[in-house]
Amino acid sequence: MSVITTISIWIIPVIVMVILLTATIQKLPAYELFVEGGKEGISIAVSLLPYLLGMMVSITIFRSSGALEAIIDHLHPFLQLVGIPGELVPLAFTRPISGTAALAITTDLISTYGPDSFIGRLASTMQGSTDTTFYILTVYFGSVGIKKMGDALKVGLLADLVGIITSIIIVSIVF
Amino acid sequence: MFNGTMADVNEALFASGQEAVTLVIGLVSVLVFWLGLMRIGEKAGILKKLASLFKPLIVKLFPEIPKDHPAMGYILSNFIANLFGLGNAATPMGIKAMEEMKKLSRSNEASRSMVTFLVINTSSLTLIPTTIIAIRMQYNSAAPTEIVGTTLIATLITTICAIIIDRLFYYRRERKHKK
């Protein structure tokens, strides 16, 4: 565990050093190249804004209007039949939509039920084993101006479902 | 609409717009730094070396991309950054990978490689969920890191399933195309 934490802290400075050293050895104009590549970053960020803003505004409306809650309320009885604890349903639905909101829900679950409870462990595992599908698709497709996502959203959401189910199974077996 | 949440919606509408702008401003610094650095790395041939190192695995995942194409190097850098939880380094590299893949497909629709790449990204590739561990420590967990194992297994299974689902959808698309 501590080995991996150490690697995580060291890796960025080491990468920066390796890149700059290799450039120096090959006598490349490192600073000019850096500026040239960096300029690209600004235009990417600016062109990303409309995609990100549209997606974030619609997601927030969906959540704050109570539509998300209404859906969760209706699904609750079915999910409980399959053995999914009701407390985790909001997290399962929020995880693909909003990273910050999901983290807030996880923190809330951990503080309410305790980090070492079944729900606390399950929330931790669920949070770590899936990612914010909508955000990732928006940023990556938006950055290259692709509006037709193909099957990406469907496959991404199916994978999230798999992630939630495996988390429940694994946490039940291990703890 | 009928729940009397209209005031909330109004507020959320503009608050989230602002949030998106803040997010993009935060992205600017990260994008400029990493894309600048990666340009040096690319010219120095580091990306190519990296790509050739993991070639066998990555070629199987992305059969549409030529073996020595720069896209491979960016895809690998993105995966590696993700594995170590370096989210802010992963995004710029992923964007470069997408650009290269777009050059290959020359179309405005998502290509097969793009879908595979993004599905692997959305299934999460974290080795150590640092944020969660920090939260668990904050709430006095007896063993804050005990979820590392379960998260790792869950991530592994999810990523494998994601790749399988991606393949199934690809073959289904192909069949539709032929008909």
Image (cartoon, helix red, strand yellow):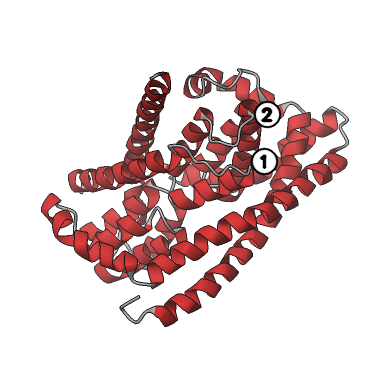
List x then y, in percent, for residue A69: 29, 67
Residues under labels 2 and 1: Cα distance? Answer: 15 Å
- Label 2 sits on what residue type? Leu
State the residue at coordinates (62%, 44%): A145
Instruction: Kindly identify which residue carries mark 1.
Output: A14
Question: Disc count in the image?
Answer: 2
Vertical order, B168 against B141 (above or below): above
Which of the image's four quarters has the C terminus of chain B? top left
Nearest to the observer: residue B16 or residue A121:
B16
The chain holding disc 1 is A
Say whether residue A116 is visible: no
Left or right side of B65 for B140: left
Instruction: Kindly identify which residue carries mark 2.
Output: B47
Circle 1 packing at 10 Å, graded few (<14), some (14-19), many (20+), is: few
List x then y, in percent, for residue A137: 50, 46
Circle 1 — which element? helix
Asked if both marks, 2 and 1, belong to the same chain, the answer given is no
- Label 1 sits on what residue type? Val
Nearest to the observer: residue A82 or residue B170:
B170
